[in-house]
Image (tube, rainbow, N blue to C red):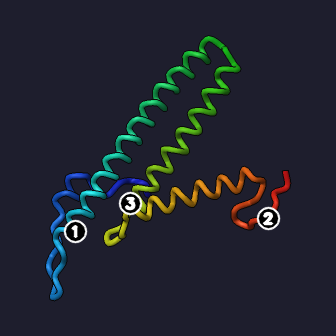
Amino acid sequence: MANEKTLTEKEILNKKFPKDIKGYDAAEVDLFLDQIIKDYGTFQKEISAMNAEILSLKGKLHQIEQANAKPDVVALRKRIHALELENASMKNKLVGIQEGDKVSSENMEYIKRIRMLENFIWQLGFDPKTLRKRNS
């Protein structure tokens, strides 16, 4: 599958970088790998939790379908679909990590701040991509 992970936390932890003519800052590489390991572990826990919730909801859905409670079935199917989309999104985040990518907490903070600003602009009635009034 295209969304299969290629590295484990242990592989990242045990990765050795060959030295070239210029060398490398081992402390900087170790710090970067520690950040990746932490993020990777967090993503794995979130994915596992979502998969467990999906299985639980599918079980509840089956019970409700057996009892023929149609309004509850619709709500559970929507929740399952939302969780599956969120799970796929998390898998895509893991797949996007490439060797040599520079990830910093500062970049993540900028992304969060941009997202909050876009939401605020949206709430004001403007499309953040065009900064034009939305047709409500």
Q: Residue at x 41, y 63 (%)?
A: 106
- Distance from disc 3 to disc 2, alpha carbons, whole Å, reads 32 Å
Where residue 45 appears, as percent x and y from the top left, is 35, 41
- Residue underneath mark 2: 132
Q: Going from the N terminus, do you reach mark 3 or mark 1 first?
A: 1
Q: Please tell me which residue lies in front, 40 or 54.
A: 40
Q: Please tell me which residue lies in front, 13 or 114.
A: 114
Where residue 28 appears, as percent x and y from the top left, is 22, 69
Amino acid carrying mark 2 in the image: Arg
- Residue underneath mark 1: 29
Depicted 43 relative to depicted 28: above or below? above
Q: Going from the N terminus, do you reach mark 3 or mark 2 first?
A: 3
Depicted 115 relative to depicted 68: above or below? below
Q: Residues within 10 Å of mark 3 (few under 14, many from 20)?
A: few
Q: Residue at x 52, y 26 (%)?
A: 57
Where residue 17 appears, as percent x and y from the top left, is 17, 72
- Distance from disc 3 to disc 1, alpha carbons, whole Å, reads 15 Å
Count of marks, rendered view:
3
Hey, which residue is sitting farthest top in the picture? Answer: 67
Q: Residue at x 18, y 63 (%)?
A: 15
Amino acid carrying mark 1 in the image: Val
- Residue underneath mark 3: 105
Q: Nearer the viewer, mark 2 or mark 1?
A: 2
- Distance from disc 2 to disc 1, alpha carbons, whole Å, reads 44 Å
SS at mark 3 in the image:
helix
Q: Nearer the viewer, mark 3 or mark 1?
A: 3
Question: Relative to 105, is 68 on the left or the right?
Answer: right
